[in-house]
Amino acid sequence: MIQPPDQKPSPSDNPQKPRARRIAPSMTRFVAISWRDLAISFGPILLISAAAIYLAVRLIQPAPPNTLTISAGTKGSSFWNNAQQYKKILARNGITLNVLESQGSLDNLQKLEDPNAKVDVGFVQGGMSAAAAIVPGSAPATSDKHDDLVSLGSVAYVPLAVFYRGPVLTRLSELKGKRLAISTEGSGTRALALAILKANGIEPGGNTELLPLAGDAAADALSNGSIDAAFLTGDSAQPPTMGKLYRTPDIRFFDFTQADAYARRFPYLTVLNLPMGAFDLAKNLPEHRIRLIAPTAELIAREGLHPALSDLLIEAAKEVHGRANLMQSANEFPAPLAHEFRISDDAERYYKSGKGFLYRTLPFWIASLADRVIVLLVPIIVVLIPGFRLVPGLYRWRVRSRIYKIYGALIAIEREAMTDPDTAQREALIDRLDDIEAKVNQMKMPLAYADQFYVLREHIGFVRQRLTLAQSVALDAQADSIQHTT
């Protein structure tokens, strides 16, 4: 049917042409580096590194203190003299050692167990826990549990010297009913004397008079006949005092003929043999071999002692106690001989391997600083440096993931377009494509990825072209159909 010239065709007679779409111009910014992507890529590694460094700082040993306090013994005793030598040795490394006077081993142990005493280390002869159990009035803190105390090793033998008047004695039980000086309260001498006297049937409260005399007071009392016997050790008596008694007429030096039995009965005791002529070869003093019993003196410390100070104390012990004498061989002490206190981990490491490399090659304080710096460097080397190697890959993945996400949406549109959609559905697909292109045009993209960006835009244009072509074909087919019907 032909229409009149003055008649206008109705809108239904002509198919609609594809509507023009105005796409926002490209506002894409190309930057040298996408700081946001870099922060997201590097952030987790930085957090993990910070956490590792924080843990290292928390776990690292602080700088060693420059002051220590040692509980020694009475002034002039072997323990006191040894502590004074330690003080000089530690001073060479910038450490001040305060030497605290005490009554002896038991007093030292009680001070170490008392947190208010502020004692870091002390000389304690073996067997103090067991011996203190029978000491009247001993502090209840002295027990079988010393979880907060550790041993840095034994540093010397502490032989028990018993001097007496009268005929030759072969057993301590023969002193029953006599007047005995067994040292003062708190001394290791008293604790040991009470332990072995009890084994011989002599206890406080009996007919044997046990007097709290030590050192020169006990020697003077024995010399003038006020007492019958004196028990002396290095924790509360001076070596010259014992030497003087040995040379005093009518005073005898007790020979422990049952020494082996004592060592079996008391595991912390060692049998020592003093050879004939050991004191004086010309005068043949002593005239025969004398058997002695001796605990070892241990260097006991609180468990929190800094490892570097532990090494210094053992070094000092080697210098002071390592020489040979009548009772020991050269380099026999210090030694990791554990009795009632476990050897500390730091002391065990020292006895096995010696001082660490840094402390062997550098001055003490520089080595201490370097040791802590190395601990801080470990998380940096283990976490941060490998993390830096991962950052470029994470950064590339982060930038490309944004492009790949757009490709995912683009592929979805293309697949729907292949299902032969109707006009309304095709319009909806073009709207979605417009939204994608608008987002792409607003992207901030590193310049290194400009080629991938432009390839993405080409692919968007390719999909748009397919949709537009399909829509045009559909509209032409619709127009032909209308033309044929008219």
Image (spheres, rainbow, N blue to C red):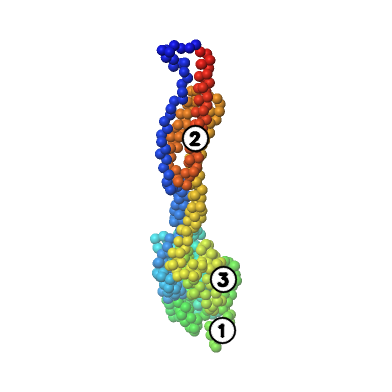
Per the image, label 2 sits on a secondary structure element best described as helix
Q: Does the image show residue 221?
A: no
| Residue at position x 43%, y 79% in the image | 220
The type of residue carrying mark 3 is Thr
Per the image, label 1 sits on a secondary structure element best described as loop
Reading the image, the residue beneath label 1 is: 277
The image position of residue 121, as x and y in percent, is 45, 66
Residue 460 tag number: 2
Q: Residues within 10 Å of mark 3 (few under 14, many from 20)?
A: many
Reading the image, the residue beneath label 3 is: 270
Real-space Cα separation, disc 2 to disc 1, in angstroms: 110 Å
The type of residue carrying mark 1 is Gly
Real-space Cα separation, disc 1 to disc 3, in angstroms: 21 Å
Q: Kindly give the residue lying farthest to the bottom in the view shown.
A: 282
Per the image, label 3 sits on a secondary structure element best described as strand
Q: Earlier in the sequence, mark 2 or mark 1?
A: 1
In the image, residue 444 above or below residue 287: above
| Residue in the foreground of this view, choosing between 5 and 258 | 5
| Residue in the foreground of this view, choosing between 485 and 127 | 485
